[in-house]
Image (tube, grey):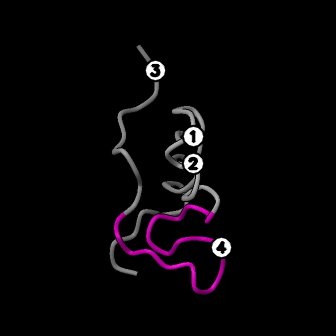
């Protein structure tokens, strides 16, 4: 059993936009993180979750 927190399958909130830079305005992930999310390890995903939550993501109304 993993000691990682229980999280949703993805931080995606269907507010997808990388118009101005390489960071999604909805979930806060980079384009590379979005592209590779399904193949990332749970530990790698948790590091992304920690970063985006600290930065105030996911954002549903951006």
The structure residue drawn at horizontal position 57% and vertical position 32%, both measured from the top left corner, is 43
Q: Is residue 26 left or right of residue 48?
A: left
Whole-angstrom CA distance, mark 2 to mark 3, is: 16 Å
Q: Nearer the viewer, residue 32 or 2?
A: 32
Is residue 53 found inside the magenta-colored segment of the image? no
**Which segment did they paint magenta?**
13-31
Q: Is 18 rendered above or below residue 29?
A: below
Quadrant of residue 26 within the rendered picture: bottom left
User: Which is closer to the viewer, label 3 or label 1?
Assistant: 1
Residue at the top extreme, as displayed: 1
Is residue 21 found inside the magenta-colored segment of the image? yes
Whole-angstrom CA distance, mark 3 to mark 4, is: 31 Å
Mark 2 / mark 1, whichever is N-terminal: 1
Q: Mark 3 = which residue?
A: 3
The percent coordinates of residue 41 (x first, y second) are 56, 33
Q: Do tag 3 and tag 4 residues touch (Cβ < 8 Å)?
A: no
Q: Mark 2 = which residue?
A: 48
Q: Is 57 rendered above or below residue 25?
A: above
* Secondary-structure class at tag 4: loop
Question: Considering the image in quadrants, where does the N terminus appear?
Answer: top left
Q: Mark 4 = which residue?
A: 22
User: Which is closer to the viewer, label 4 or label 1?
Assistant: 1
Q: Mark 1 = which residue?
A: 40
């Amino acid at each position: 059993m993993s000691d990682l927190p229980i999280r949703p399958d993805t931080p995606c909130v269907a507010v997808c936009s990388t118009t101005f830079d390489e960071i999604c305005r909805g979930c806060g992930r980079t384009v590379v993180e979005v592209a590779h999310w399904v193949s990332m390890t749970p530990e790698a995903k948790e590091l992304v979750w920690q970063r985006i939550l600290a930065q105030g993501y996911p954002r549903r109304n951006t």
